Amino acid sequence: MLFLDTHAHLQHEQFRKDRDKVIENALDSGISEIINVGYDLESSREAMKLAEEYDFMYAAVGVHPHDASTLNKSTAKQIEEMAGHEKVVAVGEMGLDYYRDLSPRDVQKKAFIEQLEVAKSVDLPVIIHVREAHADAVEILKEWGRGDGVMHCFSGSVEQADAFLKLGFKLGFGGSLTYGSSRLVSIAELAPRQDILVETDCPYLTPRPKKGRNEPANLRIICEKLAAVLGISLEDSAAVSRRNARTFFRLFEA
């Protein structure tokens, strides 16, 4: 039984001291692939380095909406250049975050659109972060017109999930699925199985009943919850989500 973590941040400073042990734990838990996702230029470069060091790791490169103010012609060009690396499988994470508003909203929109265009130019899917900004994200993605992305750690309503699914986007489910939210359970039940991806977003969003820092080994807990929600076996939950991810990120055949 193998699991694929579609969204991790093993380049994060929280893993500096014991990353080797965390990776060992992941492998022992059946994690077959990990996609480390960048959130600024430095973290994107570090994700690429990990992908070069480990055969089972891949990278995504991009600028998070919190850091949208750092995106300019130079940084966008650097992201485009990094996206050409053979182990880079997506552009992101990018998007809109109106909950924290760490960058002005107009700047967030501009950075989001510019990175979508980078992804189009290099023909890669996108990893999208949206928090309390779903209506604006839908409009931007309609204009983009590709429908080739995943709504990372989806946090919206059933109606908003339906809007993204109709545009062709996948939904990413992480530790928050285990927090007792009836809304997320309903969304997972309604989503077409081929449109479901699983992720840890480590070191964040530790699934219950675990506490403390999250890590890829905990993906099994998320898949167990997904299996219970869908009324299928853990084996099927792992297999379906992994197959979806390998297809979405255009990885080699199992």
Image: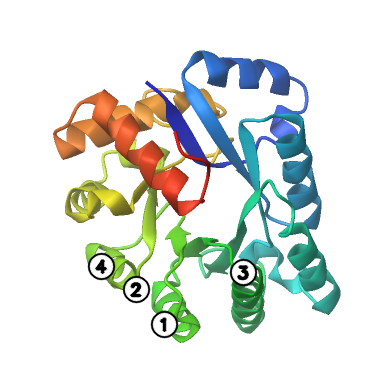
Q: Residues within 10 Å of mark 1 (few under 14, many from 20)?
A: few
Name the N-terminal-most of marks 2 and 3. 3
Residue 200 seen by the camera: no
Residue receiving disc 3: 119
Name the N-terminal-most of marks 2 and 1. 1
Name the N-terminal-most of marks 4 and 1. 1
Residue at the right extreme of this rendering:
74
Name the N-terminal-most of marks 4 and 3. 3
Closer to the observer: label 3 or label 1?
3
Mark carried by residue 167: 2
The residue lying at 67 percent from left, 80 percent from top is 107
Contact (Cβ within 8 Å) of mark 2 with mark 1? yes
Q: From the image, which quarter does the N terminus lie in?
A: top left
Label 2, label 4: how far apart the Cα atoms are: 9 Å
The residue lying at 51 percent from left, 51 percent from top is 249
Q: Amino acid at mark 3?
A: Ala
**Nearer-the-camera pick, 161 or 119:** 119
Q: Amino acid at mark 2?
A: Leu
Q: Residues within 10 Å of mark 3 (few under 14, many from 20)?
A: many
Vertical comparison of 214 with 167: above or below: above
Q: Secondary structure at mark 4?
A: helix
Name the N-terminal-most of marks 3 and 1. 3
